Structures are given as structure tokens and as C-alpha cells.
Image (cartoon, rainbow, N blue to C red):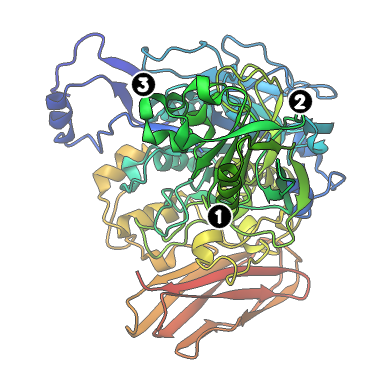
Amino acid sequence: MNVKLAPDTLLHSYKSFNGFVARLTKEESERMKGMDEVVSVIPNRIHSIQTTRSWNFIGFPENVQRSKVESDTIVGILDTGIWPNSSSFSDRGLGPPPQRWKGSCQNFTCNNKIIGAKYFRVDADIADIISPVDTLGHGSHTASTAAGNSVSNANLFGLGTGTLRGEVPSARIAVYKVCWKTGCSNADILAGFDAAIQDGVDIISVSLGPRMVTFTDYFDDEFAIGAFHAMKRGILTSKAAGNAGPHRGTMTNPAPWIITVAASTTDRKFSTKLQLGNGRIFHGISLNTFSPTQKSYPLIYAGDAGRRNNSMSRFCRENDLDGALVKGKIVLCDGYTPSQYVGLASGAAGLIFTATLTSVSVEAFAMPTIQITPSDGNSVSSYLKSTRNPTATVFKSIEGKDSSAPYIATFSARGPNTVTPNILKPDIAAPGVNILAAWSSVSPISGVRGDTRVSTLNIISGTSMACPHVSGAAAYVKSNHPNWSPAAIKSALMTTATPMNPTVDLDAEFAYGAGQINPLKAANPGLVYDAGENDYISFLCGQGYNSSSLQLITGDKSTCTSANKGSVFDLNLPSFTLSTPRSSHNNVTFNRTVTNVGSATSKYRATITAHPSSLKVEVVPNVLAFSSLGQKLSFTLKIEGSINADLVSFSMIWDDGTFKARSPVVVYAP
């Protein structure tokens, strides 16, 4: 290259793909972008981390039949590291790692459960413990959800009691610490991908994402780049959809070689009781582990307790409250303020938030809290003004049942796919609300410095928590079918997913993809839609990428020609998506090939579920007769007509009487 770099400019070189990390001036960066051999120059963006009842809820009991290969399956976790002292990561009963394993442990004592542990910190200015040890808790939570041991009588100070376990409890874990207190840089993320690929993991789990909704080209996206190279090595990447919901177009993981995971609820919810001095009782939500230490506490309105007449005190941010006025009192707050901004609330004895209850997800605070409706908040305010000595008590939370579950969490990012509108995203949904899992005991469960509660478990929510459910499910499928490709595993998970209710989740497939995971069925899907590197290259050529870009990305002599510029409608995905203006007439054909992995001799018939009469939908042929395992047969799905709604969805199902492979079909107006 013609750019002259200072000796200390090169920070890191990747091995699995052609790339490096360098400290460049703006001028050097622009000059490098203009070089023929450079595909892209990506600024070092900072990303953020995106948290047992869930496995039983989705129909995956602890005593499920398991393959002997499970203990040879390795799940790679890109996150904040791991807390090795957790019972979830004991190696009791496990033999040595698989002989093929090439990983190692860096400033960390591994065992036969945690067989690899590395950290990446390209930016030397980041201050943290320099080891893979998890000081934040998030990485331990995701790792235990995917592949943690079974831990009986697990609970968070009496809440959520049950057996904690990962999907594949005898699988091995390799951790790649790419996130620090300041966030997760894309240079570190790519280094984590690179190492995981070189080490030989089977599944990569990534519960990370941008702090702001950003839409980029596939190869300006470090997650798409890392996952593409993982796919080349036979490794499926499971990725959190992000927490920017509930609006459409907020999903930021568009690559078809990634399985993108939305967050759904389970039937467990937490509720909390508030009692006023006049005896009136209100019920709200929170994750309150504190029991009252006295009968009642003085009650004050936050708007009357600000520092130097600070009107912002009504939102109960710690720096806005006057400690002399709120200490030892329960404070009535306007709206809802997340725990990290409330802090210790200047010594308050508790907080009452008044905000619309849009979600059942709860978070831990450093003091007793409850969230009630604005209407109930008005009643509390009226009581406060009616007496000279108002009092209140917030009780410890209790566990209840949410009979309307599953549905998609409000925070879960929604489709459509803004990079390739004719590919469905997210792909699938999994439990991500109020999930109990492992935690770092040096990290307060509320995330607030000064919170003295110590626990190796925590209950948190996010698409970060949904992602490792799918990572674990993918590892379970992989353990039953070691030779399946990433696309085949993704297909098995999607075509066996449990349908969700579009009258509850109005964004339908843009909220939940193919539906909620069903790992038991995914291990025996009957048919799979397979795809490999050449299929994705053909797709990318059809999307406008040129040969030089592909060669630098793939590391081989791949070229884009007129023969391999594939249509997006021909990419062999287990879903069908058409973006079209309302009332516009369409005549589109999707080409697909399925591989028989069910019964050697079988006959599948295609059915289309109810759809608008304005659309003519036809499967040709509508019967596929297989005579052997591994046999591949092709078909087309033709859609003709128009829609008069923003979104129309239905299903195409292949059924042989034993197996059903269901694919979502989505037609929508952008």
C-alpha cells in the first residue's frame, strides 16, 4: 500500500479474513478508501451488550434425549467474559476437551467446561481487569443460558426459584471477551470472531449490537463480516436482533447467513404491592428483592425534593434529588427512569414510578421500587396531598403467571430488513424477558455502584437473553447432526418454530420471524433448506458487489459473472418475503430446493394457509416424493396479484404426515 503509517499505527492483524486494525488520521483513512485493493474502511464504532423457566416453557424438558456428541460441541460466546466461580461452569463429570480444539486460555484458569478464554482490547486506553473474567455479568448470563450446567434451587433472593440450566449442559464453552465497561469496539468484535473461527467453535453467540439504529452495507458491518467467515468454516452465528423496538425498521442484523433473534416472553411475571398509610393497596411491576424493615416509611413527591429547586427532580435521577429531603423516605416519581440513572437515589428508602405499563420486563434497582400506572399514580399523589404525614410501604415482589405469553417484548427490534427488503428479518423468536441465569458476583445486580447485594445469579431482559436460547438450540441440533451446515441448522430451527399470534403482535413476522423456537422438533425437521458460500456469493453478486470486493472478502478467486448474479428470490432461505407498493400488481417466482433429512421414503404435500383473495399463490410441484435420505428436490412458489394492506402474511407447509416444515410468507408495502 502507498499510505505511509507510523510504526505504532498497526494495532492488530486478523487471520481468518484479510484485514487489520490501524490508528489512522482522517486523511489517511480517505486515501486508503480510494485504493483498489481495499474493500472498506470501517470506523471503530462502539457497540453495547443487548438477559429457569424458559426452557420448560418452550417445551424442552431437562430429561430430553441427548446425543453423546453434545459434550464435543463447543459454543463460542462473544461478550463481557465469564465468571468462572459460578456453578453453571463447573466441569464436574466432564472429560477433556475434544481433540480438535485449538483454543487456549489467556490470563485465566480454564477447566473442562470453560475450555477457552481470551480477551481483546485493541484500544489500550480502556481501563478494566485485563483477563477474560467477567466484571459486568452479561457474558456469564448469556453463556449459562446457552450451555450452562444444571443448577438446582437457583433463585435471585427467593425470586424465580427453579432449576437453572443451559440448552446443552454438557457442551463446552469458549469465551471471547470483546466488551468492556466502555462498550464493545468493532475492532475487538472482529478479533473475537477471528479467534473463535481459528479455535474451532461450532456455534458463535453474539448478544451485542449498535447503541443507535444504524443501517449499513453488508461489508461495512463487522457482524456480517465475521459471521460470513464463520459460515465459510461451517459455524452458525446467532445474533441478538437489538433492543430498539417497538417501531418497524429498527432491526440491524440483515445478513441472511446470520440467524437473527427477537425476544419473546415466558409465562412468568413479577408483581409488587404498594400500600399507603390509609390502607389503600396498589399492584404494579418491579423486580424488588427487598422486604420492608419497618411497617411504613414517610412518602414525598420527587418534584418537591430537588436540589436548588431543580424541577427535573421529579424524574428521580440521583443527582437531581436532595439527600436531606429524601433520605429514609419513599419517593413518588414522574415517569420511569432506568436503574443506572437513579443510582442510590440520594439515600431514599424506595421509589414509586408512574408510567404506562407497556412491558412485563423488569429490572433490579438498588432500593425497593415499584412501577404503577399513571392513574394509580394520581391516586397516590392525591393521598400524599391529603394528609400531613403521608406514608407508604413497597413489599417484596412475588412471582405470577402470564397466561397471554408468548408475545414479543416491546423493546425487541422489528423488521423489515432495510438492507435487503426481500429477506425476512428477524428470523426467529426466543425467551428474552425476565431470564434467570449466571452473574458475576463482583457486579451489583442493579448495575449501581454501592448496591451491596452479591449474587452469582441475576434476572434481566433483552434480545441479549433471547440470542443464547437460539445459540443453545443450534448447538443441540448440531450435536444431533454434526455434519449439517449453518444454513441447514438455521432452516431446522425456523421451519419447526411454533407459530405466534399476529393479533397480539401486530407486526407479525417483522416482530417474531418464523415464530418461537422449538428445539425438540428442530432436531428432526424432515426437510431443510440448505445453502453454502457459493449461494451467498451469488446473492451478493446480484446485490451489486463486484469481483474484487468478493475476492478480498472470501480470500479466494470468487468472481461475479452474468451466470452467478443470483436473484434474491432464488437464495435458498426457509422464508419467503416480497416488498411491493400497495395495490401494485406482482408476478414473482421464488426458487427453492429442500433436502430430505426425515424418512428415506416419503411424500410431502404443500399447503398454503389462508391468504387474501387478491393474491394467487401456487407451489409447483405441490408434491415432492423422496426415495432416499439426502435427496434434494426443487420447487417454485409463485405469487401473483396485489395487496391492499401494509402487511399480509401466511404460511407454506410441506407435510408428509410425520414431519411438517413450515415457512412464513410475507408480502408487505415498504
The picture quadrant where one finds residue 654 is bottom right
What is the CA distance from the residue labelled 1 to the residue labelled 3?
A: 46 Å
Instruction: Judge by depth and name the residue closer to the eye, 219 or 354.
Output: 354
Inspect this view and state whether residue 237 appears: no
* Image coords of residue 175 (percent x, y): 59, 25
Residue of label 3: 13
> How many neighbours does mark 1 have within 10 angstroms: few (below 14), some (14-19), or many (20 or more)?
few
Q: Could you tell me the amino acid type at mark 3?
A: Ser
Label 1: state its secondary structure: loop
N-terminal of the pair, mark 1 or mark 3, is 3
Instruction: Give the residue pinned by disc 1.
Output: 358
Number of marks: 3
Q: In the visual, does 496 lie left or right of 544?
A: right
- Is residue 128 in view from this perspective? yes
Mark 3 → mark 2, Cα distance in angstroms: 57 Å
State the residue in front, 305 or 270: 305
Image quarter hosting the C terminus? bottom left
Mark closer to the observer (1, 2):
2
Nearer the observer, 639 or 275: 275
Q: Position of residue 216 (x, y in %)?
A: 31, 47
Please identify the residue farthest to the front as the structure is shown.
388
x and y percent of residue 130 in the render? Answer: 51, 10
Label 1 to label 2, Cα distance in Å? 31 Å
